[in-house]
Image: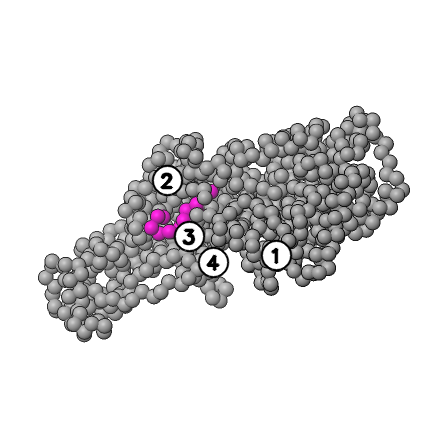
C-alpha cells in the first residue's frame, strides 16, 4: 500500500521545490489562486465575501448564518455535496460581485471571530491553530437583507464578539435576572472542559432541581454535585441554593454514512459554567465548516487545474475524483479512473509510434515502454504540479485543521504517475478525443492532438515500407477474398483495404512484406500483437468502468483480466471461425488448432450452462487469442483509428454473446447475483484466498 499524507506544517517553511523523503517527495500544498493567499491578511485593503446557503426540503436554498471571507474573488457559484451524519446536504457558495473596503482593525476583528469560532468547533486539534495563523479563508457572521436578498457581514455581531469578556458575564446572575441572552448562548463547564472538551446548548433552567438533589433515574442516590465531587474531584464549595441547567451536548458531526446517536441530556451547575463569545447559531453551523472548507478548497483547486490544462468544464467532477486519494475516506477516489487512463495511454502511445516511427516491432515496443513508465509520468506530474492539487486529507476531526498557506503533501513516484493516469481517465469517460488532446499537451508538440493526423502519417509510413520492401502491389486472391468476406459478415464491417485483414490473419512464417513490419500479425510473439491487445484492453476497461452499479477497482481488474485472457479470447475466435482462415499455418500449428477447436465444441455441447467452462479446457494455443486481437487491430487501422467503431465490433462479438457467462464465472467478486459456480473457479479462489498462493496455476480435469 502506498502511503501519502500531510506532514508537519513546520517542514514547509520556505519550501518551493520537491524534497526527497525516502521513497516520497514533499510538495507545497496548493492554495487556490482565487483566494489571494499570497498577501497577508494584515495588508489587505479589500475583501470578498461569499454567502452560504443550504438546499431545504422545499427545494429552496436557505441562507446560513456565516459567510466566507477571502482575499480574492471565488470565480463562480459552486454547489457542494456533503454527507453529514448519514444525511446528504447540498450547499451553495455564491460569491459577491464586488469587494468590500476594510481597515486593518476590521480585518483583525474578523480574524478574532474566525479563530474563536474554529477553536470551539474543533475537537482535538483546537490547540494546533493560533489566532495569527494565515488561514486560506475566514468566516464571519452574516446578515441578510430580505428585500434585496443580498448578504453582508454582520459588523455589529463581530464587534460584540470581539469585546465580549466571558469572565465578566455570570451565568448565575443571568439566570437570576432571566436574561434573554441565555437563549442565544453556548455553555462550557470548566470541569467538563478540562476533561472532555465539551460544549452545551441550554435546554431549560430547572428551578425545581438543585445540585444535591438526585437527578439520575438509574441511580437514585446520584446527584449532580456528587458527580462533580467523585468524578472530577471538584475542590470548590458547591452552593446548594442554585438551580440546575438542563443542557444538550453539542456533538461534533462526522462524514459518515451512518447517522450518529443522539447526545444524552445532562445537568450542569451554573456556578461552574461560562458563556462562549460565539452565539449558538454560529457555533452550531461551524461544526460543518471542516468538511465544507475541505470540499470548497478542493473544488477550487480542481477548477484551477482544469483551466490550466484547458479541460472541458463538463469533466470537473471527474477531475476532482482523479485528484482524490484513497485515504480521503470518500466514496470515490482516483483508482478506477487510473485503471481506465492507463489502458488508454497505452493505446495512444501505440498509435503514435506505430504511425510515426518506421522501425521494427520490438523497437516500437521499447519506445512505448519508455514513455509509459512511472518515472516518465511522474516527471509530467511534477511539471503540472499535480501533487499540489491532490486531496488526501482524511477529514477526521482528530487530525484536521483549517487549510493554511504553509501546508505540504508527500507523494511517491508511483502515486504521482497514477494520478496523472487518473486525469487521463477523467477525460476518457467524457470523450476519448478529449483524452487525446490532453495527452498531446502532456507529452509535447511531437504528439498529435487527434487520431486523424496519425492516419495521414501512417499512410506515409506504410508506403515507405512497401516501397523499400518492393511489395507495394500485394494482391488478395479471389479464394482468399471469399473466405475473408465471411469474417466481414460476422463482424458487420467492410474493409476499405482488405489486405489489412488478410495480413492480420497470416502466420508470420509467410515471406510477405508484413513479416518485416506488421503490428497486426498475430503470431510473431506478444509484442507483435501489442497494438491490438492494448486497444482491446482499453475498450473492455471502458465498458466495465461504465457498469452500474460501479465495480470497485479490484472487481474491475478481475473482470478485465477475464475478458482479455487468452483462454477466453480463444472462445471468441472459434465462434467467429477465425482459425479457419489462417494463411500459411504450419502443420503442427494447424493440428493444435483443430484439437482445441474439438475440445471447445465438446465442452460447449455437454456443459452449455456452466459459466466459465473454458477454464476447464486445456491451455489454449496462444494463436487463438492473437487472432481476435489482430482482427480488431486491422479494423482499427482500416477505419482510421476509430475507437468507437472497434467498440461496436467488440460489443457485438465479445460482450453481447459472452458477457453473462464471463460475469457469472467470477461469482461474488463482481457483485452480480449468480447461480452455481464452476468447480474450477472455486478451486482458484480456494488456492488464492485460503492458501495465499498468488502465482498463476495451470490444471485440468483428468
Asked whether the residues under the numbered discs 3 and 1 touch, taking CB atoms below 8 Å apart as contact, a structural biologist would say no
Left or right of 87? Residue 591 is: right
Q: Which residue is mark 2?
A: 7
Residue 137, percent from left and from top: 39, 45
Q: Secondary structure at mark 2?
A: loop
Mark 3 Cα shell of 10 Å, populated few (<14), some (14-19), many (≥20): some
Give the mark, 3 or 1, whose residue is nearer the N terminus: 3
Q: Which residue is mark 4?
A: 90
Left or right of 205? Residue 448 is: right
Asked whether the residues under the numbered discs 1 and 4 touch, taking CB atoms below 8 Å apart as contact, a structural biologist would say no
Mark in front: 1 vs 4: 1
Mark in front: 3 vs 1: 1
Q: CA distance from mark 1 to mark 4?
A: 41 Å
Q: Secondary structure at mark 1?
A: helix
Q: Which residue is mark 1?
A: 665
Which span is picked out in magenta? Answer: 390-400
Give the mark, 4 or 3, whose residue is nearer the N terminus: 4
Give the mark, 2 or 3, whose residue is nearer the N terminus: 2
Left or right of 560? Residue 505 is: right
Q: CA distance from mark 4 to mark 2?
A: 31 Å
Q: CA distance from mark 3 to mark 1?
A: 43 Å
Total number of numbered discs in the rendering: 4
> What residue is shown at x 39% (from left), y 41% (from top)?
6
Give the mark, 2 or 1, whose residue is nearer the N terminus: 2
Viewport quadrant of the N terminus: top left
Q: Is residue 256 shown to the viewer in this render? A: yes
Amino acid at each position: 500500500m502506498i502511503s501519502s499524507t500531510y506532514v508537519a506544517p513546520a517542514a514547509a517553511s520556505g519550501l518551493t521545490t520537491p524534497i526527497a523523503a525516502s521513497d516520497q517527495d514533499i510538495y507545497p500544498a496548493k492554495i487556490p489562486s482565487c483566494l489571494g493567499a499570497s498577501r497577508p491578511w494584515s495588508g489587505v485593503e479589500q475583501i470578498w465575501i461569499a454567502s452560504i446557503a443550504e438546499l431545504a426540503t422545499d427545494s429552496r436554498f436557505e441562507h446560513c448564518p456565516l459567510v466566507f471571507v477571502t482575499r480574492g474573488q471565488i470565480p463562480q457559484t459552486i454547489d457542494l455535496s456533503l454527507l453529514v451524519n448519514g444525511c446528504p446536504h447540498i450547499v451553495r457558495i455564491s460569491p459577491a460581485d464586488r469587494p468590500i473596503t476594510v481597515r486593518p482593525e476590521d480585518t483583525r476583528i474578523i480574524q478574532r471571530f474566525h479563530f474563536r469560532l474554529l477553536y470551539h468547533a474543533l475537537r482535538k486539534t483546537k490547540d494546533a491553530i493560533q489566532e495569527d495563523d494565515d488561514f486560506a479563508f475566514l468566516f464571519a457572521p452574516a446578515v441578510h437583507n430580505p428585500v434585496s436578498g443580498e448578504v453582508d457581514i454582520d459588523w455589529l455581531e463581530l464587534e460584540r464578539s470581539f469585546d465580549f469578556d466571558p469572565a465578566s458575564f455570570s451565568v448565575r446572575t443571568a439566570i437570576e435576572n432571566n436574561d434573554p441572552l441565555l437563549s442565544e448562548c453556548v455553555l462550557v463547564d470548566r470541569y467538563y472542559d478540562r476533561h472532555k472538551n465539551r460544549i452545551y446548548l441550554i435546554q431549560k433552567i430547572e428551578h425545581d432541581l438543585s445540585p444535591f438533589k438526585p437527578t439520575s433515574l438509574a441511580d437514585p442516590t446520584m446527584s449532580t454535585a456528587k458527580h462533580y465531587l467523585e468524578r472530577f474531584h471538584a475542590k470548590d464549595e458547591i452552593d446548594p441554593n442554585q438551580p440546575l441547567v438542563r443542557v444538550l451536548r453539542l456533538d461534533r458531526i462526522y462524514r459518515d454514512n451512518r447517522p450518529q446517536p443522539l447526545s444524552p441530556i445532562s445537568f450542569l451547575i451554573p456556578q461552574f459554567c461560562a458563556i462562549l463569545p460565539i452565539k449558538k447559531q454560529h457555533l452550531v453551523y461551524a461544526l460543518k465548516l471542516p468538511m465544507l472548507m475541505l470540499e470548497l478548497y478542493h473544488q477550487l483547486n480542481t477548477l484551477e487545474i482544469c483551466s490550466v490544462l484547458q479541460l472541458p468544464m463538463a469533466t470537473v467532477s471527474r477531475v476532482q475524483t482523479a485528484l482524490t486519494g484513497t485515504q480521503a475516506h470518500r466514496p470515490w477516489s482516483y483508482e478506477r479512473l487510473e485503471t481506465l487512463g492507463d489502458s488508454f495511454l497505452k493505446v495512444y502511445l501505440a498509435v503514435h509510434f506505430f504511425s510515426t516511427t518506421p522501425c521494427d516491432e520490438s523497437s516500437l515496443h521499447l519506445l512505448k515502454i519508455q514513455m509509459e513508465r512511472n518515472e516518465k509520468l511522474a516527471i509530467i506530474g511534477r511539471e503540472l504540479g499535480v501533487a499540489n492539487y491532490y486531496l488526501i486529507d482524511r477529514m477526521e476531526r482528530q487530525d484536521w485543521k483549517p487549510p493554511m498557506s504553509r501546508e505540504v503533501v508527500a507523494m511517491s513516484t508511483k502515486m504521482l504517475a497514477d494520478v496523472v493516469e487518473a486525469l487521463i481517465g477523467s477525460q476518457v469517460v467524457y470523450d476519448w478525443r478529449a483524452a487525446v488532446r490532453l495527452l498531446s499537451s502532456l507529452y509535447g508538440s511531437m504528439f498529435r492532438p487527434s487520431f486523424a493526423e496519425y492516419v495521414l502519417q501512417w499512410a506515409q509510413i506504410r508506403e515507405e515500407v512497401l516501397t523499400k520492401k518492393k511489395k507495394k502491389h500485394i494482391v488478395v486472391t479471389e479464394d482468399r477474398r471469399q473466405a475473408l468476406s465471411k469474417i466481414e459478415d460476422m463482424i458487420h464491417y467492410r474493409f476499405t483495404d482488405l489486405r489489412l485483414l488478410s495480413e492480420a490473419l497470416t502466420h508470420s512464417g509467410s515471406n510477405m512484406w508484413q513479416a518485416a513490419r506488421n503490428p497486426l500479425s498475430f503470431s510473431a510473439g506478444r509484442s507483435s500483437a501489442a497494438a491490438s491487445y492494448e486497444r482491446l484492453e482499453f475498450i473492455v476497461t471502458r465498458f466495465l468502468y461504465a457498469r452500474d452499479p460501479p465495480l470497485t477497482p479490484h472487481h474491475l481488474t478481475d473482470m478485465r483480466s477475464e475478458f482479455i485472457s487468452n483462454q477466453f479470447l480463444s472462445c471468441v475466435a472459434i465462434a467467429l471461425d477465425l482459425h479457419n482462415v489462417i494463411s500459411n499455418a504450419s502443420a503442427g500449428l494447424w493440428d493444435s488448432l483443430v484439437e482445441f477447436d474439438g475440445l471447445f465444441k465438446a465442452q460447449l455441447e455437454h456443459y452449455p450452462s456452466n459459466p466459465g467452462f473454458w477454464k476447464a479446457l486445456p491451455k489454449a494455443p496462444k494463436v487463438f487469442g492473437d487472432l481476435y486481437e489482430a482482427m480488431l487491430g486491422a479494423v482499427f487501422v482500416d477505419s482510421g483509428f476509430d475507437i468507437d467503431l472497434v467498440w461496436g465490433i467488440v460489443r457485438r462479438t465479445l460482450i453481447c454473446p459472452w458477457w453473462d457467462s464471463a460475469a457469472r464465472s467470477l461469482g461474488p467478486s463482481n457483485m452480480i447475483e449468480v447461480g452455481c459456480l464452476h468447480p474450477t473457479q472455486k478451486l482458484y479462489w480456494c488456492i488464492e484466498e485460503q492458501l495465499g498462493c498468488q502465482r498463476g496455476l495451470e490444471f485440468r480435469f483428468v
